[in-house]
Amino acid sequence: MNYGCHANPSEGWGTGMTKHFQLTTETNENHIYKPSSYRNIVISITILLSRCLPMLKQHSAYCSCCIVLSTVITFQCLVFLELYAAEESTATTTPVTRRIDSLHRIVVTTHDTSRVKALYALGETYLFQSIDSAERYYQRGLALAESIQMPIGVLEGLIMCGYILDNRGKYFEALDSVLRALSLAETLHNGRYRGIAFHAIGNIYKRQGTYEVALHYYQMSLQECINTGNCSGIAAEHAVCAEVKFLQQDNNAAIDLGNKTLQIMKECQQHWNEARFTPQYVLGIAHNTIGFAYLAQHSIDSAMNHFADALNISYDKAILSKAQCGIGLANAYQGKTQKAMYFGDQGMRLALEVGRKDYIRDSYWYMANIFASLTKYDSAYYYYQRHIELKEALNKEQIAEKMAHLSQLQERERREYEQKQQTFVQYGLGGVCILAVAFAGLMASRYRLKHRSEDALQAVNAQLNEANEELQHQNKALMELSKEKDELLGIAAHDLKNPLSGILSIADTLLLYSNEISETNKHQLLQSIVRSSERMFRLISNLLSINAIERGGMTLQLMSLNVKDCVDSVVNDYKLRAEQKGITLQLIGNDTTFAQADEAALVEVLENIISNAVKYSPQGKNIWISVSPQAAMLTHQPSNSNDQIPMIRISVRDEGPGISADDRLKLFGKFSRLSARPTGGEHSTGLGLSIVKGIVEAMNGRVWCQSEVGEGATFIMELPAAPFVSQTAPESADL
């Protein structure tokens, strides 16, 4: 039985019969022998000769004998010609065509079990060519198996019909078919088919998003494989369990189960005996699952390796589609636009070729994420809308299927009710007691039918309300994303317009009047261009930084770092700018203060905080920068923990206008515009402190501000101290 997503011949009893009837000669695909054409020629010649014989007999009996003899010889020659043509045709047809012809002959000429096996073999042959034909042959085989009371044949037919219904999205009908198979397998005490039925039920629930129930049935199937010593089945069940864990966002469990699948595959791939899956299919699922789990953890290189393995190993379009989408998303995270769009498009095309709506829905989701990671928000919005539309369509189809299923149940109950009514009329004369009992039974049945229908309708309405609420929530999130995008573009356009306009104006001036402008004025104009360019560069850098923080794409290398050295470097860089405003930078700290941090990230945080202090401090004031070890409790510690963790505190205190209570509430938000203004006409994007907060928290630290209006502001940042390094606080560390 080929139960899975591969069109690979299996070793089940049905496939054994298929292989028995299969011809093996290699042939030309374009020529298919039609015996009827040669047979028609023979019949035509025979009729012609039979009409000529009466006329020839009038001349001579001898001539008549010759004619009869020649007719027989001619007929025999044509028969031999037909046989020769049949042999020639057999040598020029495809193996699949010969297999189908052979199976059709068996269906016509045999009966009972052989005919059932041939019908199932035809269904298996058509399974990945024409699902309608496959369904027709499996249903014919199932009906015949039930009529001749062939239990194993009934099991095979029920499971395969359930598989086809599941792939068509008819989940309730599929579940009904597989549950019948499970009941029969338990009656026969057949562990193999019981495990297959459990797996099929798990597939149905997984496609509906009921992952806990799906995982439960997969684990039951795994236990049956363990009980029967089916090593190949154990590997396959580990692979699908890993997939469910990833769908539940348990990435570590998904990676562990996926790696365990690969380990088991190494042990049993050489003697594979699992008819439901091919080794390539199981390996493809495992590598894709591990790849997406690593991608969720931002381990891009590991994810890319597993996606590449899936592409190299598997030939199933569904698996190849997910691998291509995964590679596209990984390249998008790395900012490789062309590769990301190419692989994402290839994955989506494969999903469209497969034709399964759930695969197409997932490919749209991957494309939306790819474009969002590349900051192409219009394209991301487009694919996200298509994802939502298809998801809503699938939900409506499921609800329609549930309603149809409920209607079938109601119709069945109605027929039972009418049948009971007819029985009541026929046997009503049997006595008052029988009449009373029958009437009571009818009323109970009617009440039960009404109660069941009401419960079912309430359940459907609840699911509709839940689906609508989810859709409203997603639409709201999408509108917020679009609003944020518009705000971002508006601020960027506004803040880039003025410096660009200034650069253009100065450049025109230099171009038109270069001979008339003195060298001193030229130098001043060039300095203006440099300042405007630096302003645009800072804005773009801030936008890229905040985008990297929000999508989790910032890679930090945490190491033992001398904080004092970093502070010294930034203070020296800003000393000249401070002196231009008459501001004094005073540094207090220990020369050997080590923290667990990323050097480039820490420098960016210090530049933002110190530049703000210089920007908002009046002329002739002081700024104090302090570095000292502290013992603190982090906010992410357990509530029952009183342990204090060694931290390194960096504080920057200024004598500026201070920050009001209202401004402190939005201090670390994006695009925050505060009431205080820079004292030297400097420019502010409103992104600096948002970047500071994101980077500090990414380094397992925290940052906050202490300030009152008119009394300056103190920005305090704490980072985990580096282990095994002695930290000694100087006496003047406290501000």
Image: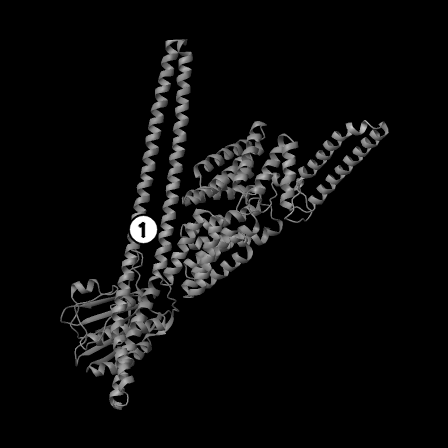
Q: Is residue 681 left or right of residue 48?
A: left
The residue furthest right is 62
Secondary element at image label 1: helix
The percent coordinates of residue 333 (x first, y second) are: 41, 63
Identify whether 38 is placed above or below 504: above
* Image quadrant in which the C terminus is located: bottom left
Identify whether 491 is placed above or below 410: below
Way the structure is coloured: one colour
* Residue 594 occupies quadrant: bottom left
The percent coordinates of residue 51 (x first, y second) are: 74, 29
The residue furthest front is 59
In percent of the image, x 69 and y 44: which residue is there?
A: 89
| Total labels drawn | 1
Whether residue 38 appears in this view of the structure is yes
Identify whether 126 is placed above or below 726: above
Mark 1 — residue?
Answer: 474
In percent of the image, x 33 and y 44: which residue is there?
A: 467
The percent coordinates of residue 233 (x first, y second) are: 55, 46
The percent coordinates of residue 402 (x first, y second) are: 39, 36
* Residue 576 occupies quadrant: bottom left
Q: Is residue 324 left or right of residue 433?
A: right
Q: Amino acid at mark 1?
A: Gln
